[in-house]
Image (tube, helix red, strand yellow):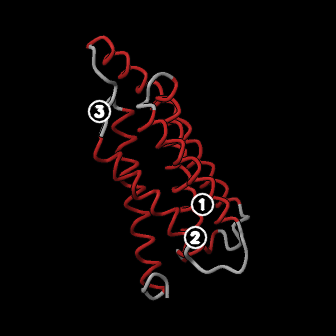
Amino acid sequence: MIMGMSVPAFTFLHVVISLVGIAAGVIWLGGLVAGRWFSTWNAIFLITTIATSATGFLFHSAAFGPPHVVGVISLIVLAVSLVAMFVFRQAGLWRLAYVATAVLALYLNAFVGVVQSFQKISPLHALAPTGAEPAFFVAQGAVFVLFLGLGYLAVRQSNRLASMAGRRGGQAQPAY
């Protein structure tokens, strides 16, 4: 039992939270790349991604391993995101810090999603049973390149949005 739930029920909840976080993050990131700021999707992304990382530590494990390392990195990255967003309100370089760390947190969630997909989905598992086969590395490489490109575009657009808001005397993104 984990938090009063059976392990399968808790696993299901953890996966749903993770998938909602990825979906919300992709919508937020797509909006940003298109020159729009989606505050609600951004908030859903942050909350569910933090919840995903935090609930991941509740699974029983014999030792500290790679999933724990990714979880710690994700929570540190998300802490920087929160500081950039709420303490510094994305002023100056904190806008870059926010966008970069938010995209990195989304990438880490997607990275784990790819790992889990290759472990749990039979056709993918058949392509890479140990996770050391070319199919796995191609998939992870494609996800990395995709997020690198989208992150670059997101930073560029966030700078454009900030400069437009500055000319109008407003904030680049609404605070919530």
Does residue 158 appear left or right of residue 139 in this picture? Answer: left
Q: Residue furthest front?
A: 87
Q: Position of residue 24 (x, y in %)?
A: 36, 52
Can you identify the residue that label 2 sits on? 57
Q: Position of residue 101 (x, y in %)?
A: 53, 41
Spatial CA distance of label 1 from label 3 is 29 Å
The kind of residue tagged 3 is Pro
Residue 18 image-quadrant placement: bottom left
Residue 18 vs residue 171, the one in the foreground: 171
Does residue 159 appear left or right of residue 112 in this picture? Answer: left
Q: Position of residue 11 (x, y in %)?
A: 47, 78
Badges 2 and 1: C-beta atoms under 8 Å apart?
Answer: yes
Can you identify the residue that label 1 sits on? 71
Question: How crowded is the residue under tag 1: few (<14 C-alpha within 10 Å), some, or many (20+)?
Answer: many
Q: Residue furthest top?
A: 167
Of pointers 2 and 1, the one earlier in the residue sequence: 2
Q: Is residue 87 above or below residue 135?
A: above
Badges 2 and 3: C-beta atoms under 8 Å apart?
Answer: no
The kind of residue tagged 1 is Gly
Question: How crowded is the residue under tag 2: few (<14 C-alpha within 10 Å), some, or many (20+)?
Answer: some
